Image: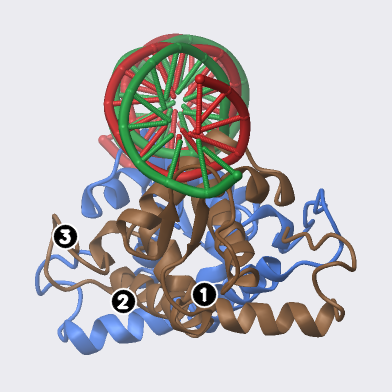
Chain colours: A brown, B blue, C red, D green
Amino acid sequence: MRLSTRGHYGLKAMFDLAQHYGAAPVPLKLIAERQSLSEHYLEQLLGALRKAGLVKSVRGAQGGYMLAREPDRIKVGDVIRVLEGPIAPVDCVNETNPAECDQFECCVTRTVWAKVRDSIAGVLDSISLGDMCRDARQIHPGGEGSGPSGTS
Amino acid sequence: MRLSTRGHYGLKAMFDLAQHYGAAPVPLKLIAERQSLSEHYLEQLLGALRKAGLVKSVRGAQGGYMLAREPDRIKVGDVIRVLEGPIAPVDCVNETNPAECDQFECCVTRTVWAKVRDSIAGVLDSISLGDMCRDARQIHPGGEGSGPSGTS
DNA sequence: ATAAACCCGAGTAATTTACTATGGATTCAA
DNA sequence: TTGAATCCATAGTAAATTACTCGGGTTTAT
């Protein structure tokens, strides 16, 4: 019942980009430093997020990454689905293409997992990057300059 | 964001035991057959559940396993925590001993994961094995003899 | 021209997962 | 009293997954 580092790190990176939305593109190196993540690894995650249309990139010197749309229009669930795949505690309740139950069409443990899936999706789809930024501002008023802002 | 087979199979087995609560102990072999699981592997899971006090065992011929208390007093969450460990999408929001955030005490992605954790725990702790049996009876009226009852 | 950046695919060590194997200890029943 | 049916415990292991690293390329501002 654990997230991999892909989702964990990826959300940190997206939150970082959300905090710099509207400004110049943020170079990978800077995100990796601020969130203390491996640069090369993060590159893969941002590549996936770019292909999924959640971030845009600017190549060349002074380039970097930025959110493809406003922080309020990107949900945590969008990010996690790109990096971790469809939400599914077990395969037979997969969001996009549920695996065939090898046994019978009707099963009880399955409905338990479906409820878990829906409750996870409900939370992830109810929080946007914009929400996270507002929360951060409440906790760390003063923003940017006033010291580092770790994200677990 | 996926359960391992431990939790998946373990809940199937516990549901099987719940459906036979009050009767003679159910031998491992029978559970494994009915739920089409590896016998030896399931043995490990039931061992853990026994040590955790959720099932009792009777050794020797005519022995087997049975729930340690009424199905209504065993929640799905109890089973999953034994087999999968504490519920924690990421380590820093572990239910029992949260890992230190290496960076800072205050972080925003962390509160997201805490909400996910609580929502998962909420679902798992709201469903008992007794509930599952009643659901099964509604779907498969006639019970026992009327054909196999797969559990995904 | 150079340096700062992104882009891409392959490789890999460590860990986890999902079992299997083996042998023993207990108990019922004939 | 013997044999079969059970549970109990530990160790081993092949496959998959994870979390990266490596070594190149390509693009673009200055």
- Mark 1–mark 2 contact, CB under 8 Å? no
Q: At which x and y percent is residue A36?
A: 71, 44
Which residue is more in the foreground, A63 or B75? A63
Seen in the picture, residue D4 relative to A90 is either above or below; the reply is above
- Mark 3–mark 1 contact, CB under 8 Å? no
Q: At which x and y percent is residue A127?
A: 53, 82
The residue located at (24%, 62%) in the rendering is A92
Callouts 1 and 2 on one subunit: no
**Res. B61 in view:** no
Q: Amino acid at mark 1?
A: Leu
Q: Residue under label 2, please give it.
A: A111
Which residue is more in the foreground, B114 or C27? B114
* Mark 3 surroundings within 10 Å by alpha-carbon count, few (fewer than 14), some (14 through 19), many (20 or more): some
Seen in the picture, residue A105 relative to A70 is either above or below; the reply is above
Q: State left or right for residue B44 relative to residue A136.
A: left
Which residue is more in the foreground, D9 or B145? D9
Q: Which mark is residue B124?
A: 1
* Mark 2 surroundings within 10 Å by alpha-carbon count, few (fewer than 14), some (14 through 19), many (20 or more): some
In three-dimensional space, the C-alpha distance between marks 2 and 3, rounded to whole angstroms, equals 12 Å
* Mark 1 surroundings within 10 Å by alpha-carbon count, few (fewer than 14), some (14 through 19), many (20 or more): many
Q: Amino acid at mark 2?
A: Thr
Label 1: chain?
B
Q: Which mark is residue A101?
A: 3
Farthest bottom residue in view: B138
Q: Amino acid at mark 3?
A: Cys
Circle 1 sits in a helix, a strand or a loop, which is it?
helix
Q: At which x and y percent is residue B22?
A: 43, 72
The residue located at (33%, 59%) in the rendering is A90
Q: At which x and y percent is residue A121?
A: 42, 76
